[in-house]
Image: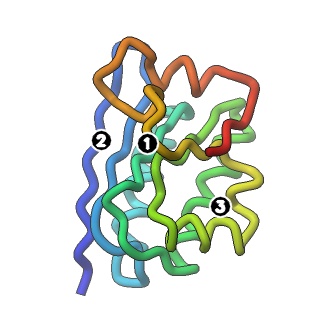
Amino acid sequence: MENLEIKTQTDKNGAVTVTLSGSLDIYAMAKLDATFNNLLGKKQYKIAIDLSGVDYLGSACAGVFIKAYGVIAENNGKIVLINPQPNVRDVFDLLGISKVFSVVTGNKKLCLPHTSISFWDLLHSSENIHG
């Protein structure tokens, strides 16, 4: 049974924050894939994904991130992964995903959605930031 909650918010510069909570397992794969397909269909290629509420990441959903990354990279966009739980980060590390995506962890101001530093700034940077 799927228990994934997905919220999206677009900032004034067009960057999208996707907040995920629950388990990213096989049951959540279709919902996650549909969310990315919707965003990419709207040509939204600057995406921050808040993973602080995700308690599990299965390989099927990791594949959805990889698929989205391919489209985003082709369009000079960027995905930033925000605050993955340690067990979720371990899956990203094991699969090599954290070597490709920017990953921000900890209490850095960049992680906080209501600060003067926007994800837009991070999404436009040419660096990968790893916590």
Separation of residues labelled 2 and 3 (CA atoms): 19 Å
Mark 1 or mark 3, which has the lower sequence index? Answer: 1
Q: Identify the disc placed on residue 8.
A: 2
Residue in the picture at 45% in, 46% down:
49
Mark 1 or mark 2, which has the lower sequence index? Answer: 2
Residue in the picture at 76% in, 54% down:
99
**Contact check, label 2 and label 3, Cβ < 8 Å:** no
Separation of residues labelled 1 and 2 (CA atoms): 9 Å
Q: Amino acid at mark 3?
A: Ile
Q: Which residue is mark 3?
A: 66
Mark 2 or mark 3, which has the lower sequence index? Answer: 2
Q: Amino acid at mark 2?
A: Thr
**Contact check, label 1 and label 2, Cβ < 8 Å:** yes
Q: Nearer the viewer, residue 60 or 51?
A: 51
Q: Identify the coloring.
A: rainbow
Where 53 sits versus 105, above or below? below
The quadrant of the picture occupied by the C terminus is top right
In the image as oriented, which residue stretches furthest toward the front?
Answer: 107
Q: Amino acid at mark 1?
A: Leu
Image x and y of residue 33, in percent = 45, 63
Residue in the picture at 44% in, 16% down:
117
The quadrant of the picture occupied by the N terminus is bottom left
Separation of residues labelled 1 and 3 (CA atoms): 15 Å
Secondary structure under the numbered disc 1 in the rendered image? helix
Secondary structure under the numbered disc 3 in the rendered image? helix
